[in-house]
Image (spheres, helix red, strand yellow):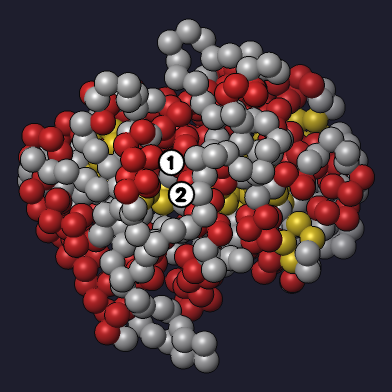
């Protein structure tokens, strides 16, 4: 079933946090015109792709498309239109709702996919392409993620990556302040830690999204509202924004940022906070699990000092969002078969192997939120090249239902769970220094997959 985090993000959007048709920055392509019900099915031509501007797109997808995909498909030219998260939603919704057909491929998520499909704005990928494309293993997609991108049981977008949320912390800073982070912290504990860690003008006790937008500050705030017992609407669709639980959560978040957060937080979302954390200016950072990849590849020295904890809770046993940046094809655009070639390539198992070969295993998009397959190194070793000497071994692709480290949602931290957490180097600032424990990429990817699967499986 879809997680409560996913449900509340959709409700937030319905409730008015999304005003995406107001500002558009449409980017046109010479091969993209066509009527709402028309368009051609050419397997060649120009494919214009609207994407969010984050490191996995600008630093991987775009250069690999130019150096690999276009060489493998000489009749296809791919053009990218990159946007911030808020601007992306505005541009895409205006484009597909008015059938401007400026984009052959759009990057959307679990909110837009079923809504756009219901409105007839997207191509039914299941019927149009997946059913006849034996090479595309749609059955391997994580069921909750696939369901979130479906309408009437058919996929209208396919996931590039999936994510939940978790807490990052600088072990060195915590150790100096005498703070120990549990694997499953409460927001009350996080607030107390932030107060001890905060060094005004030097290091923020915690960094949180403050930029206005339902995919920006509301992404983090929604999880706080949920775990404080609040909701946007009740089951009768009556607004609950003035309920005691909602007001308590909102005030807690705002006061936490004001008291111990980064200066100028109202301008900060994922990319800005990634930079601040990578520069050592955040003692803690609560954000998307996908950030682990960027920290490891862009800020290796900080990565070596980074600890990981589950999304903080308060009244619930778990928290965190479920999101998936995914690719869909608008109805009526030209060159649809060429668009599907790109979409199927960018969301394939082979794409991840390509990223690993080019940039290293630490740069691979978080497959835990995209595909069921999770590679056990011993199995994978027989089939694929190993990472270079000295690079931590990632959990790699092999078609198995679950990796043993992935568990179903559980209430509170038990002794057995704490022992497992210590093995993975989370919840203990000194774990990396303990004999036999290495806080490497395997720890990051195991924790990241646990969090995403946990968020996806919650009722």
| Residue for point 46% across, 90% down | 238
- Give 45 or 65, whichever is nearer the viewer: 65
Can you identify the residue that label 1 sits on? 447
Mark 1 closeness class: few <14, some 14–19, many ≥20 residues within 10 Å: many
195 over 319 or under it: above or below: above
156 over 361 or under it: above or below: below
| Residue for point 36% across, 33% down | 423
Can you identify the residue that label 2 sits on? 451
| Residue for point 81% across, 25% down | 73
204 over 60 or under it: above or below: below
Label placed on residue 215: none
Q: Are marks 2 and 1 in contact (CB under 8 Å)?
A: yes
- Is residue 104 in view from this perspective? no
The location of residue 236, given as percent across then percent down, is 52, 91
- Is residue 200 in view from this perspective? yes
* Left or right: 375, with 337 as reference point: left
The location of residue 126, given as percent across then percent down, is 83, 54
Mark 2, secondary structure of its residue: helix
Mark 2 closeness class: few <14, some 14–19, many ≥20 residues within 10 Å: many
């Amino acid at each position: 079933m879809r997680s409560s985090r996913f449900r509340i993000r959709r409700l937030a959007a319905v409730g008015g946090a999304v005003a995406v048709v107001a500002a558009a920055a449409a980017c046109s392509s010479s091969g993209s015109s066509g009527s709402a019900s028309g368009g051609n099915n050419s397997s060649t031509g120009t494919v214009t792709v609207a994407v969010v501007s984050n490191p996995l797109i600008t630093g991987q997808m775009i250069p690999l498309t130019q150096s690999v995909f276009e060489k493998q498909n000489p009749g296809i030219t791919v053009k990218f239109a990159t946007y911030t998260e808020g601007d992306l939603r505005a541009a895409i919704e205006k484009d597909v709702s008015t059938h401007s057909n400026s984009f052959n491929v759009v990057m959307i998520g679990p909110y837009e996919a079923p809504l756009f499909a219901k409105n007839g704005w997207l191509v039914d990928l299941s019927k149009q392409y997946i059913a006849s494309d034996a090479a595309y293993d749609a059955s391997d997609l994580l069921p909750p993620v696939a369901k979130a991108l479906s309408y009437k049981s058919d996929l209208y977008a396919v996931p590039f990556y999936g994510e939940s949320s978790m807490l990052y912390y600088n072990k060195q800073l915590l150790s100096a302040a005498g703070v120990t982070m549990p694997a499953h912290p409460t927001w009350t504990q996080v607030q107390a830690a932030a107060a001890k860690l905060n060094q005004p003008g030097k290091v923020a006790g915690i960094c949180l999204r403050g930029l206005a937008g339902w995919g920006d500050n509301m992404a983090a705030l929604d999880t706080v509202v949920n775990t404080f017992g609040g909701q946007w609407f009740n089951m009768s669709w009556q607004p609950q924004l003035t309920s005691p639980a909602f007001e308590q959560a909102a005030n807690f978040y705002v006061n936490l940022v004001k008291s111990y957060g980064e200066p100028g937080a109202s301008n900060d979302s994922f990319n800005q906070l990634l930079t601040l954390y990578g520069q050592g200016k955040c003692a803690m950072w609560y954000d998307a699990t996908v950030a682990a990849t960027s920290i490891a590849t862009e800020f290796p020295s900080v990565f070596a000092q980074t600890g990981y904890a589950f999304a903080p809770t308060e009244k619930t046993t778990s928290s965190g969002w479920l999101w998936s940046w995914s690719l869909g094809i608008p109805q009526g655009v030209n060159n649809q078969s060429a668009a599907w070639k790109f979409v199927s390539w960018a969301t394939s198992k082979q794409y991840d192997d390509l990223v690993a070969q080019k940039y290293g295993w630490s740069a691979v998009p978080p497959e835990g939120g995209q595909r069921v397959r999770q590679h056990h190194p011993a199995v994978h070793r027989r089939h694929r090249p190993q990472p270079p000497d000295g690079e931590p071994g990632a959990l790699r692709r092999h078609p198995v239902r679950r990796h043993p480290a992935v568990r179903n949602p559980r209430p509170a931290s038990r002794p057995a769970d704490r022992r497992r957490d210590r093995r993975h180097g989370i919840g203990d600032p000194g774990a990396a220094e303990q004999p036999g424990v290495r806080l490497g990429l395997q720890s990051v990817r195991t924790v990241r997959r646990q969090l995403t699967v946990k968020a996806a499986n919650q009722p």
